[in-house]
Each structure stands twice: as C-alpha cells, then as structure tokens.
Image: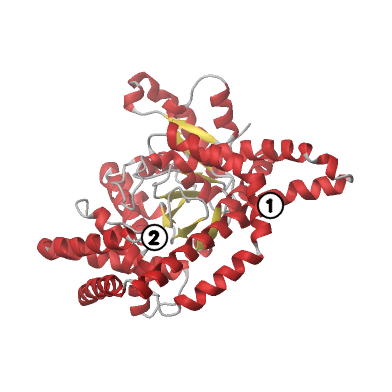
Amino acid sequence: MKYEKWSLGYWLLKQYIRFVDWIIHDKIILNGQAYIPKNKPILFAPNHQNALSDPMAILLHTRYQPVWLARADIFKPGIITLALRFLKIMPVYRMRDGKDQLAKNDKTFADSIKVLENNCALALFPEAAHSAKRQMLSHKKAVPRIVFQAEEKADNNLDIHIVPTGIYYSSYWKFNRSVLVNFGEPILVNDFLEAYNENPSAATLALRDALEKAIEPLTINIKSKEHYECFELIRAIYGKAFAKKSGERNGFLNRFKTDQQLVKILDELDTSNNEKTEKICSAAKHFDTNVRKYGLRSWLVESHENNFWKLGLNKLLLLITLPVFAFGFLFNAIPFFAIDSIVRKKIKDFAFWSSFALVLGFTLFPIVYLIETWAISGWLPLWWHKLLFFISLPFVGKLAFRWYILLLKTIGRARLFILKTFRKQVWQTLKTQQEQLFDELNKLS
C-alpha cells in the first residue's frame, strides 16, 4: 500500500469508527474548518493529551486519510507493523533507537514527500508525548525538521501548510463526553525557507516557537503545575458562573472560550500573588468537600431556584422512558461493564483508558450484539426483524446511558430538596460558602 494513495479499506474502517465515535461522544464540535486549505500539502500539528483519541479526533472529522508519523519503537515485526502501515502510520527513528537506525528515516522522508506532493496530509504531534492534563508540553523540533527536509529534498517546491490544531475534551475517558477540535490559521513553511537557507538551526527554532504560539490559543493550557488540580476544580465549580458573568451564551464552544479566559486569570494570579491563590484554592477545596459530603455537586447549589419543578419533571420523564432504559441496559450492560472493568484494572495510565475502551468497544460490542440477536432470533421470525433489532442496540444503549445520567441528576435534586427542607442550616452554610468563593473569584476579573 502506498501511503499517498486513497485506500478503500481505510475509508470503510473510518466510516465504522466514526459511527462508534458518535456513540461514545455527546457532542463533537469542529471549529475553524475554513482554515484547512484545499489542494495544498498539509501537516496537521495538534496538541497531544489523550493517546489514541487525539489522532482519531482529526482523522475521523476531516476528509483526509492523514499519514501519521510515530516513534519507530512501536513498530514490532509481524502483524503490528502491517496493521500500522494499513492505518497509514510511518516510523520515525530517533537517536535513542540507535545511531545506525537513523538512516532508515530517508525512506520515511521520501514517503512523506510523496504524500505532500500529492496534496495529501501528514500529521505529527509537536510535543512528541501526551500529558494527560490540560497543559501543553514543550514543543520538540520534529515538525520543523521534517517539513524543512521535505522541502529541501523537493527543491522547495512543495508549499507545505502546517495547520495548528487544538483538541479539547470535557473528559479524557468518560463515556458520553464532548470533544472540540479547533483548527487554526495555517503556518506557511515558505515564510521560513529563506531563513532556513541562511541558518537552519535558527529557522528550526523559529518555526517551532511559531507553531507553539499558534496552538496555545486553540487549547486550554493551565500553566501552573503547583495549582493545576485546584484550577481544574475552580473551572468546574465557577466556570458556568464566569461564562454568565462574561455575557456568553450557554454552549460547549462558548464555555471553552470563557474557560480559557478563566484559566488565564488564575495563572496570572498564581504568578503575582501566591498567597491569595492558596487562599482561593483552600476555599474551593473546602466548599467542594462539603458539597460532596452531602452527596451533591456544586451545580446543584448554584442553580437551586427551580430545583423542585425540575425534580418533578425528571421523575415523570424517568418513569415514561423506563422501558427504553431497560431494553438498552439489558443488551448493552455486559460489554459496557466488562470493558470498563478490564480498562480500569489492567491499564495503569488513565491517559490510555479511552484508547483501550475504543478498541475494545468497536471489536467486542458487535460480537455481543450478534450473539444476542442469535439468542432471541426465535422471537423474531422475519429477517428484517432481526436486522432492525441488531441495528437498534447501540442507539438504545446510548439512550440507556443518558437515562442513567438523568437518574443521577434527579437523585441529586432530591437530596438537595431534602437538605433545604429538613437541614436548612447546613444548606445555608453551603450557599454562603459558595457565594463567598464566587465573590472572591469575581474580584479577579
């Protein structure tokens, strides 16, 4: 298989994984697609925080079959190498792989040039590692080196466009999470070629820094290492109120933008006044601990005014849709909980949880669905009944999960109602703690 050629097998697999990806996510939002140039050689350069989910976020939601450059040590002899090649992943050899291995990069660069000459797409993570946090790691020189060497070997005739890309997840591993893919304005390699001809090292650093600067506005980058967990907590507790204060409408993209602003304010506070940062962090942790002590979440305390009516409506909706939940749960519970258990017990690095869950999901669920369809085939006499039943299973499974989330929210509202009715002093204490915390945070902006 030639990397630069369109692959039918890849396309078919992509359509299936796109469907699985849709089932997994609540929202998939693409922003800035107009920045992706047409009929130009492209190198996608995304931030890297969530293992296999990051390349999936790009390859599933663009028209390309991007060729990814990955470290050579994952290419094991046999079926693994064949599978990686089918998935259009090429090896890049580093000094740690052995000095004698570096010559093999000549073939990788030659194949990369063919991809770019055919106006196809390469993709590479500038950080060369994932952080599993909403923090950008320092960029390496791999992207500049590859594009400069590709241009050099092609006599500077490629006109490569580097597309900075930011990927943001509402959760790194939870089912029914949301993902935002931000595409930024392309960086033209041609703008750096003259500088590269004069001083390759300086041009490499300049392009690396320009790319890092272009990606950062497309992500949420909490720079504080000491207070990272605290700032994430404040974002969860105060983010909605801050968005409302900023005049932004509800919505995942708008919330992302205001969370960026909030994180910037917190990072600036951390730099200028560590004592005040510690005080606010302590108040946030204390409030969160007290809220969870009573089985609540901070959003319930914040939006308590219409809790009684929503509690009643939620109960009615849960009752009406109970048969849908029962159907979805019955035929999806075994693979869902089996995968969840395997991933949590066997995978130590939670940054890989979503990756392993995805792979296990798109292989195990169809097998279970086929077995379940066969098991009840006696009650489905017509072939199209069996087909309809089989097709419905992932959809009712997703509905069952949403029913479960609604149940949890309803239980939370019920606990809040009981607390406000029978333990008014406790409720007032929680509300006062929240108001005091919000007042302190409001002063920062």
Which element type, helix, strand or loop, lies under badge 1? helix
Taking the view exactly as shown, the residue that stands out farthest to the right is 382
417 vs 48: above or below: below
Residue under pointer 1: 327
Percent coordinates x, y for residue 400 in the rendering = 61, 55
The label number, if any, that marks residue 46 in the structure image: none
Q: Residues within 10 Å of mark 2 (few under 14, many from 20)?
A: many
Taking the view exactly as shown, the residue that stands out farthest to the front is 422
Residue under pointer 2: 218
Q: Is 392 left, or right, of 267 in this rendering? A: right
What residue do we see at 54% from left, 25% from top? 80
Percent coordinates x, y for residue 233 in the rendering = 30, 59
Percent coordinates x, y for residue 409 in the rendering = 48, 64
Query: Which-is-in-front pick, marks 2 and 1?
Result: 1
Q: Is 54 left, or right, of 443 in this rendering? A: right
The quarter of the picture where the C terminus appears is bottom left
Q: CA distance from mark 2 to mark 1?
A: 41 Å
What residue do we see at 50% from left, 72% from top? 311
Camera-nearest residue between 130 and 195: 130
Q: Residues within 10 Å of mark 1 (few under 14, many from 20)?
A: some
Which quadrant holds residue 364?
top right
The quarter of the picture where the N terminus appears is top right
What residue do we see at 56% from left, 19% from top? 78
Three-letter amino acid code at disc 2?
Leu
Percent coordinates x, y for residue 91 in the rendering = 46, 30
Camera-nearest residue between 26 and 209: 26
